[in-house]
Image (spheres, helix red, strand yellow):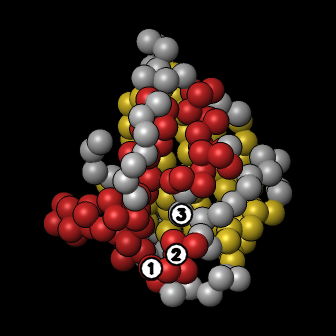
Amino acid sequence: MDLGTVNFTYDGRVALRFQQALSHSPEKVWRVLTDPQYLKVWFPADVDFDLTPGAELVFRVTPEQVRRFGLPEDHMTTGTVISVHPGHILEYLWDAETLHWELSPDGSGGCWLTLTHTVEEEDSAYAHAAGWHAGLEVVEAQLDGREVDWSPWDRADELASAYRKAN
């Protein structure tokens, strides 16, 4: 998987962007992006998506975040679903940050997955980059039916230096 890119937006915010070709249909990829069974393996919070525009989302810390970062077990943040087009677009706020997931058919039965995570500060984009990269590697493994026998948290630690050097 290629490294994500960091760019400034028209309004001075910062967009971290990943684009990945997948050999699976948008509908199958959508399940991995929204189904709690898949999310618990790769998503960096415990969240159940109510796929209704305007719905409030609650992001709770995972046991791994408590262990690694010392976050309180009851720590949570909120967000709001902005847009849902099943099999195509999912966009939501996580606190003040915007996550935009887009699936585009590639004409051969697979699709392009694009994640754009928009934040206020450049340092924040770089801080998230390795984590999303590692998570998307897990998404690909889940789609391919490969066992996920590694920690996305450890993988993000391995990738962190690549993002510091590349961007």
Q: Are marks 1 and 2 in contact (CB under 8 Å)?
A: yes
* Residue 117 percent location from the top left of the image: 50, 58
Q: In the image, residue 58 lies at what x, y percent?
A: 74, 67
- Dot 2 or dot 3: first in sequence order is 3
Seen at 54% across and 22% down, the residue is 25
Gap between marks 1 and 3 measured at Cα: 12 Å
Identify which amino acid the numbered label 3 is placed on: Pro
Query: Mark 2: few, some, or many residues within 10 Å (few <14, many ≥20)?
Result: some
Q: Secondary structure at mark 1?
A: helix
The residue beneath circle 1 is 68
Q: Which residue is mark 2?
A: 65
Does the CB distance between marks 1 and 3 fall below 8 Å?
no
Residues under numbered marks 2 and 3 in contact, where contact means CB atoms less than 8 Å apart: yes
SS type, badge 3: loop
Which residue is at 65% across, 46% downward?
37
- Specify the quadrant that holds the C terminus: bottom left
* Mark 1: few/some/many CA within 10 Å (<14, 14-19, 20+): few
